[in-house]
């Protein structure tokens, strides 16, 4: 399952920890992301049903993600289906992760 931006939810620590109810993975992911994002993330926040889920269970960043909000509003499956692709928001994400770039290139119009 890929997010609108192309990130693989099945590889996401928050998604896996929630789906498998894995407390050890929640703690490890919280510690890792706290360092990466230079903020304190508690293990209790490491829960997610995936970017495209209609569930209220989303990692806190996913709740406010501009790419997710935009794609949901436009009713598209991924950013490459948008007439504005690549926009400023997705370009920022692409600059941060090669995984997203590879996925989106494989589905690009």
Image: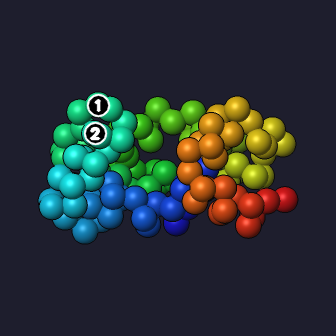
Q: Does 91 sit above or below residue 101? A: above
Q: Find residue 67 and report its horizontal and vertical position in percent.
A: 60, 39
On screen, residue 92 versus residue 109, left or right, reads left
Q: Tell me the quarter of the image containing the C terminus.
A: bottom right
* Tag of residue 39: 1
Marks 2 and 1 in Cβ contact (< 8 Å): yes
Report the residue at 65% width, 63% height from top. 103
Mark carried by residue 96 = none
User: Horizontally, is 15 left or right of 99 in the view?
Assistant: left
Whether residue 70 is visible: no
Chain-order first, disc 2 or disc 1? 2
Q: Residue at x 25, y 68 (%)?
A: 20
Percent position of residue 33, x then y: 32, 44
Q: Dot 2 surroundings within 10 Å: few (below 14), some, or many (20 or more)? A: some
Disc 1, SS = loop
Q: Is residue 76 left or right of residue 52?
A: right
Tell me, yes or no, if residue 81 can be seen here.
yes
The structure residue drawn at horizontal position 33% and vertical position 58%, both measured from the top left corner, is 13
Task: Give how far across and how far down residue 16 sits, in percent.
Answer: 32, 64
| Marks 2/1: CA–CA distance | 5 Å
> Which residue is denoted by mark 2 in the rendering?
34
| Occupied quadrant, residue 37 | top left
Q: Quadrant of residue 17?
A: bottom left
List x then y, in percent, for residue 108.
Answer: 79, 59
């Amino acid at each position: 399952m890929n997010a609108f931006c192309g990130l693989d939810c099945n590889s996401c620590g928050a998604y896996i920890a929630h789906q498998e109810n894995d407390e050890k993975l929640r703690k490890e992911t919280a510690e890792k992301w706290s360092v990466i994002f230079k903020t304190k993330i508690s293990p209790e926040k490491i829960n997610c049903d995936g970017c495209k889920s209609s569930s209220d269970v989303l990692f806190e960043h996913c709740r406010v993600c501009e790419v997710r909000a935009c794609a949901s509003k436009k009713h598209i499956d991924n950013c490459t289906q948008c007439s504005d692709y690549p926009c400023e928001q997705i370009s920022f994400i692409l600059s941060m992760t090669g995984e997203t770039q590879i996925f989106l290139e494989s589905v690009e119009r």
